Image (cartoon, rainbow, N blue to C red):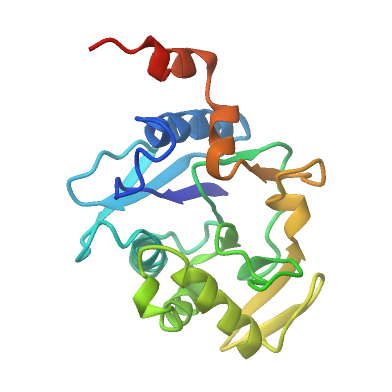
Amino acid sequence: MKAVIYHADGYRVNRYRSGIYQHLIEELRKNVNEYGMSLIHLTLAGHQGQGDENFYYAVNNPDEIIWNREYCIWQFLANDADEDEHYLIFEPDFRIIDQVPPLTTDLCLLYREDPCPITPAWRMCTKRAAPFFEEVIGYFDQAQRDWHGDSVGYSHMWNVLGQPKIGDVLEHNGISIEFRPYGWYASRTSKARYTKQWKGGEKLQIATPEFLAATDPGNQTT
């Protein structure tokens, strides 16, 4: 299995602290390497790649962050992914905390009771799932391509799939899909068993003391 992230600097890049995403990606690479995975970084042409492997894609607007993420993931799976590899696709603010149970279908998604029942921040799949990503991106809210449009798309897809729940396994257009608990893989709390996400300002909790000291506004000189 290989870990996959998308990141390219957009309008939100310095929202929490200058350089935070580059730092998070470097620390994530170390984290996944400890679990025997390499890190694939999907990004935009002209941006820095920080993975063990890097793939570059062309888009119309770098600030359409969410649209670009889903587009690049789709393009990677359709054109650049290996036939026999499994991919854990998540975000720079995730960390693996225990060995992830292996993929047994073409695609694994996380379910939670929420207005967006399928979280777009975590997916595990093979190359065979590429058409699923192509379909979901077609359901995006085109007015929110910069942020939140993915929630609209995945909520719609959940209805298309028949509103599946945890433990369900189904087939959609020839793609086998299983649903695992959100809390085990993306919770911010002690519910997390295998992977965990530090969202929003919590990102600073997984930054190293050295990074925090170097970027502390109180330590900056003019």
Whether residue 101 can be seen here: no
Q: Residue at x 45, y 49 (%)?
A: 5
Front-most of 62 and 51? 62
Q: From the viewer's perspective, tell me whether residue 196 is left or right of residue 30.
A: right
Q: Residue at x 36, y 47 (%)?
A: 12
Residue 36 image position (x, y, % from top left): 59, 35
Residue 99 image position (x, y, % from top left): 72, 41
Q: On the image, which quarter does residue 211 sit in? A: top left
Q: Is residue 55 above or below residue 181?
A: above
Residue 25 image position (x, y, % from top left): 44, 35
> How many numbered marks appear?
0
The C terminus lies in which quarter of the figure? top left
Q: Is residue 89 above or below residue 151?
A: above
Q: From the viewer's perspective, tell me whether residue 111 is left or right of residue 191.
A: left
Whether residue 34 can be seen here: yes
Front-most of 36 and 63? 63
Residue 50 image position (x, y, % from top left): 35, 36
Q: Residue at x 46, y 13 (%)?
A: 213
Q: On the image, which quarter does residue 172 sit in? A: bottom right
